[in-house]
Amino acid sequence: MPEAVISSQQKSEVISSYKRPGLKWNWGIRAWIDYTILALVLVKNTKTMVSDTYLPVLKLCSPDPDKVTRQYEDMLARREKRKLFDSPRERWRKLYGSFIRESEWALLELRKYLSKEDYEELVIGTGAYQVETKIPGIIAWFNNIRLENAEKNGSDDREERGNGKSSVKNYLKKFIIGIIDPGVYCGFLIGESKTTMDLEKGVTFEIDDCAWHSVGDMRDLPVPNQIPEQGCQMICKGICERVFNGESAVRIDFDPHLPEKSCTFKVEYRRN
């Protein structure tokens, strides 16, 4: 594993953009939601992917299984401990940072031994299976949403509001964005984002500083000061697009802007 060589200049420049001041940012409702969803949904249900899936495969493939164990233990030692008086935002940052760091290490190691096809199927296939089996209720709820359902609810207000199509469209925007507001459902993964709505094209989220790339100290990544591309491509993009592939109601397309920290993803709902 590469050793981190950090100059005094790097120490002053390379910091997490998610270490932000402010009572609302650190203790507000959004911070509690992000931490709670992260802990209960993502980490609780997928934290064993590295230890129970990736690690055994690595030990089988590596000519030096003991070295793999030592490297994994080094990753565990880098976890930032959550303290009693940490804010929910700081707990979120530490928990998410550890998940990202350990996942990135495992993915970089797996690439050394597996073909592209086997590597992608192991990571994306295993991740999609975990999501679909651990949180099937959320997946089913997402996939049962239809634009027609929103239109039906909106049509009841057409006469009352008296504004014709314009009124219905405005209602639909509020209805659909309310359902998949990233501040409630996606913020724990991506951080802050800009949401735009088009009734024909769906919902687009523009993330200027994705949390996957920003929650942890970049000096402490498996490859110091290098954007964690593998997790971005395989876990965020790969697994999400495999689960929400458009075969049911929802299709999601991720567009990472690597090597920048920004990305765009689009959610499209199929009409009945």
Image (cartoon, rainbow, N blue to C red):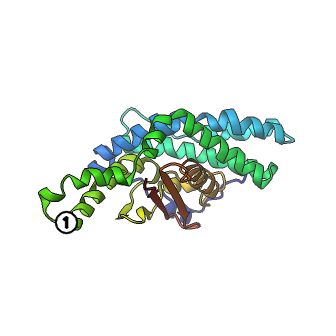
> Which residue is rendered at x = 43% and y = 53% of the image?
272
Coordinates of residue 200 in the picture (x, y in percent): 40, 66
> Which residue is rendered at x = 59% and y = 60% of the image?
227
> Which residue is rendered at x = 52% and y = 37% of the image?
43
Can residue 196 be seen here? yes
Dot 1 amino acid type: Gly
Question: Is 265 placed above or below 189 here?
Answer: below
Mark 1, residue position: 164
Q: Secondary structure at mark 1?
A: helix
> Which residue is rendered at x = 30% and y = 59% of the image?
173
Can residue 22 be seen here? no
Relative horizontal placement of residue 121, taking residue 166 as reference (left or right) = right
Q: How many marks?
A: 1
Question: Is 253 placed above or below 62 here?
Answer: below
Coordinates of residue 77 in the picture (x, y in percent): 61, 38
Coordinates of residue 62 in the picture (x, y in percent): 83, 42
Relative horizontal placement of residue 185, taking residue 224 as reference (left or right) = left
Coordinates of residue 155 in the picture (x, y in percent): 23, 55
Relative horizontal placement of residue 42, taking residue 173 as reference (left or right) = right
Q: Nearer the viewer, residue 146 or 136?
A: 146
Q: Dot 1, how many residues are within 10 Å of its Cα: few (below 14), some (14-19), or many (20+)?
A: few
Q: Nearer the viewer, residue 270 or 69?
A: 270
Q: Nearer the viewer, residue 219 or 265?
A: 265
Residue found at the far right of this picture: 63
